[in-house]
Amino acid sequence: MHEGSYFVYIMASASGTLYTGFTSDLIKRVWEHKNNVVHGFAQKYQCHKLVYYESGSSCDGVLAREKQIKGWSRYKKEDLIISINPSWADLYSQII
């Protein structure tokens, strides 16, 4: 992962629930989700699979992108995921 980068990411549960988040340490944050370290929505719905992520160098820019994606319909989020990950594979192994 790139030093000084920020990430917006989408985690999915086995039942299809999606969680969109923001972090400066994608590996650590996804590990936390996978191991139920973070209490809240993603833990409650068992969102353990990294299905999408993108990076940027501007904290404000990536935060704005997170808010944009969070405001989208589920269908639009699915289209975004499919654009880079048509099989909805867990991308965690690609980032570690």
Image: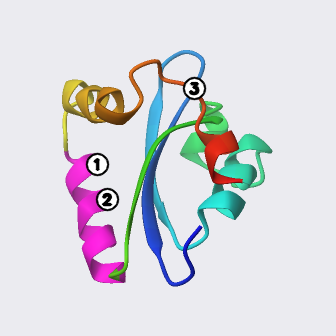
Question: Pointer 2: what residue?
Answer: 66
Which residue lies at the image location 33% right of the left edge and 26% below the top edge? Answer: 82
The residue under the point 24% across, 28% down is 79
What residue lies at 67% left-to-right and 59% top-to-bottom? Answer: 27
Magenta range is 59-71
Q: Are marks 3 and 1 in contact (CB under 8 Å)?
A: no
Q: Which residue is mark 3?
A: 13
Crowd around label 1: few <14 · some 14–19 · many ≥20 (10 Å): some
Q: CA distance from mark 3 to mark 1?
A: 16 Å
Specify whether residue 61 is painted magenta.
yes
In the foreground, 46 or 61: 61
Front position in the image: 2 or 53: 2
Q: CA distance from mark 1 to mark 2?
A: 6 Å
SS at circle 3: loop
Q: Secondary structure at mark 2?
A: helix
Q: CA distance from mark 3 to mark 2?
A: 19 Å
Whether the residues at callouts 3 and 2 have beta carbons within 8 Å, the answer is no
State the image coordinates of residue 7 (x, y, percent, origin top left).
Answer: 45, 64
Q: Nearer the viewer, residue 29 or 91?
A: 91
Q: Are marks 1 and 2 in contact (CB under 8 Å)?
A: yes
Task: Give the residue at x 45% y 51%.
Answer: 9
Which residue is identified by label 1? 70
Q: Amino acid at mark 2?
A: Glu
Residue 14 x, y percent position in the rendering? 60, 18
Which quadrant of the rendered structure holds the N terminus? bottom right
Q: Is residue 35 above or below residue 48?
A: below
